[in-house]
Image (cartoon, helix red, strand yellow):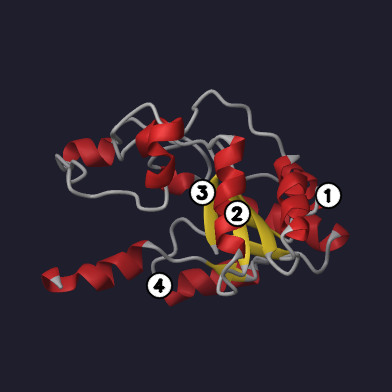
Amino acid sequence: MLSIDARLPEDVRKDLIQRAAKFSDFKGIVLDAQYYSNRVTENEWKNDFAIPPHLKCGTLEKYRKSHGSSDQLRDSYGLLKENQKISIDEVRKIKDQLRYTNRSDMKVVVKGIMCREDALEALAMGADAIYISNGCHLRTPGVPCTISVLKSISTAVRERYPHAEIMIDSGARRGTDVMKCLAYGANSVVLNRPIMWGLHFNGQ
């Protein structure tokens, strides 16, 4: 899957999709439509965390000079526009582009869904799956936890779009958490933190 931030300039998004479509290993596009702030989070501030200066974002470096307004990795080289309005119609544009590149087999997933109205609108626009996510609370403080909205979303989706996929993340730490999400109607549960903890165990 290729994850694309909806706040990227449209021509950058199109080029990223074009690049991914050339490789058969890419099976889908995740349009990340949730709001993120580029400011330091409370968690990072408490731990005195700073992004190491030698790290680079290889995927976006190509657009650094042509579209960027910053040399900072934190704000994706200034490519992301915080005030940019995100239209659900982007799903249709991506679908059209994939058809044009002969990769209509690639799925389109809309990430950042937190209510059934947005879920139904995304699917009506042609999305193959919805991805319930709240940004792990770190960048969108005060929003509900994802499992609290999962049941109402899955009920509405199953009634109108029974074959649509429902993905969810944020907060699953153990197998029982995954089982609860599946019981509430999710098809798959995306894990992040436990995987990172395992990879970084003992400094490995």
Q: Nearer the viewer, mark 3 or mark 2?
A: 2
Residue 174, disc: 4
Label 2 CA crowd tier, 10 Å (few <14, some 14–19, many 20+): many
C-alpha separation, residue under disc 1 versus residue under disc 3: 25 Å
- The reply to whether dot 1 and dot 4 touch (C-beta < 8 Å) is no
Element on which disc 4 rests: loop
Q: CA distance from mark 3 to mark 2?
A: 31 Å
Q: Amino acid at mark 3?
A: Cys
Mark 3 or mark 2, which has the lower sequence index?
A: 2
Q: Nearer the viewer, mark 1 or mark 4?
A: 1
Separation of marks 4 and 2 at Cα, in angstroms = 34 Å
Residue behind mark 1: 124
**Residue occupying image coordinates x 77% and y 56%:** 100
- Residue 112, visible in the rendered structure: no
In the image, what residue occupies the spot 77% across and 47% down?
Answer: 92
Q: Is residue 71 left or right of residue 190?
A: left
Q: Of the residues shown, which amino acid type is indicated by label 1?
A: Ala
Specify whether 44 is left or right of 87: left
Mark 1 or mark 2, which has the lower sequence index? 2
Q: Which mark is residue 145?
A: 3
Q: If you read the primary sequence from the N terminus, does the residue marked by circle 1 or circle 3 appear first?
A: 1
Tell me the residue at 61%/58% (across/down). 29
